[in-house]
Image (spheres, grey):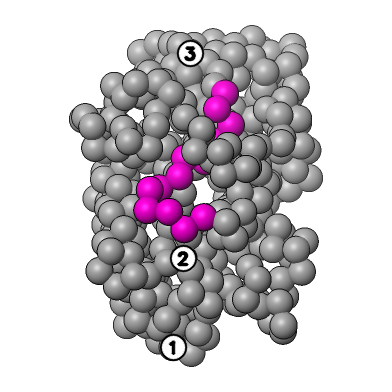
Amino acid sequence: MAGHRGLVGSAVVRRLEEEGFTDLLLAGREQLDLRDQAAVDYWFRANRPEYVYLVAGTVGGILPNSRRPADFIYDNLMIHATVVQAAHHFGVKKLLYLGSSCIYPREAPQPMTESNLLAGPLEPTNEAYAIAKIAGIKLCAAYKKQYGCNFISGMPTNLYGPNDNFDLETSHVLPALIRKFHEAKLRGEKSVTVWGTGSPKREFMHVEDLADCCLFLMRNYEGDSHVNIGTGEDISIREVAELVRDLVYPEGELVLDSTKPDGMPRKLLDVSLLHELGWQHRIGLREGIASTYEWLQEHYGAVEDGCRGSVAPTPLRRAGDRRRSV
């Protein structure tokens, strides 16, 4: 597994270990460049994973997306292509690819169903990332159609939790809010400024729920369509900022900077298919933010020094007589 210290990777590892998986293959970025097909082929040939969770990618919020669109599209296209090709070539039994809810059109009907994919123009502020993620979905579908590979795709909503990226330059909105209010409290500042009008609505899912859903889909889903992974509930940016303030720094004043971009007006996933399959989230937003803030407080020194996790792929095998039951 590469990226096992990051947000999604570490959560998947914890969930698998809870289920008794012991033969997990770990590989950091210093060992394997996932953009290099020859290196990925060598790794697959040497390690022979049976099941692959492809959760790798260059990720970030509005600011890094707008500043580094070439990185976002190139890195993600290459990572998806090399890992999927190697999974096919070396006979992986099943692969789960994770995309993002930003794959849907900016003006998609809300909540967004799986059928809304490619039904209209994308949100400009994350278009490069969205195009790469859409390509990943179609890549898995193409290998399934042409070669019969058991490759499936899941599209998670906005994630947060332990090992998140709290870098104020590159993080997503929720971890950025938690860190901003925490540091305002430490410095005794009277207010915290948040980008935009506060009116856009977002859906948030704790990464532990995502990890549980990943294992569920690996065990129970083999359909052709990608599957939305979310809570089916959303909240405005103003409301989530107020919730973070109340939990982290109740004395702080929330200031909205309407000169900054809002991004997509609303992103709520229709999770009917997921519910029909038999899975629902369990961690409420208030509970999840509180536990994430506890994690940040315990690890704040490392976060302040710039140490943070990054999302990456999770190839794995299961040892012993239970290996085929994943």
Q: What residue type is labelled 2?
A: Leu
Q: Residue at x 56, y 60 (%)?
A: 218
Residue 13, quarter of the rendered image:
bottom right
Q: What residue type is labelled 3?
A: Gly
Q: Considering the numbered disc 2 on the image, is that residue within a helix, a strand or a loop?
A: strand
Label 2 – label 3 distance at C-alpha: 38 Å
Q: Is residue 188 visible?
A: no
Extreme residue toward the left, this view: 121
Is the Cβ of the residue at disc 2 closer than 8 Å to that at disc 3? no
Q: Give the range drawn in magenta.
A: 221-233
**With respect to residue 145, does 206 lie above or below?**
above
Q: Which of marks 1 and 2 is nearer the N terminus?
A: 1
Q: Does the magenta stretch include residue 310?
A: no
Dot 3, how many residues are within 10 Å of its Cα: few (below 14), some (14-19), or many (20+)?
A: some
Dot 2, how many residues are within 10 Å of its Cα: few (below 14), some (14-19), or many (20+)?
A: many
* Residue under pointer 2: 95
**With respect to residue 32, does 142 lie above or below?**
above
- Label of residue 45 in the image: 1
Q: Considering the numbered disc 3 on the image, is that residue within a helix, a strand or a loop?
A: loop
* Residue under pointer 3: 198
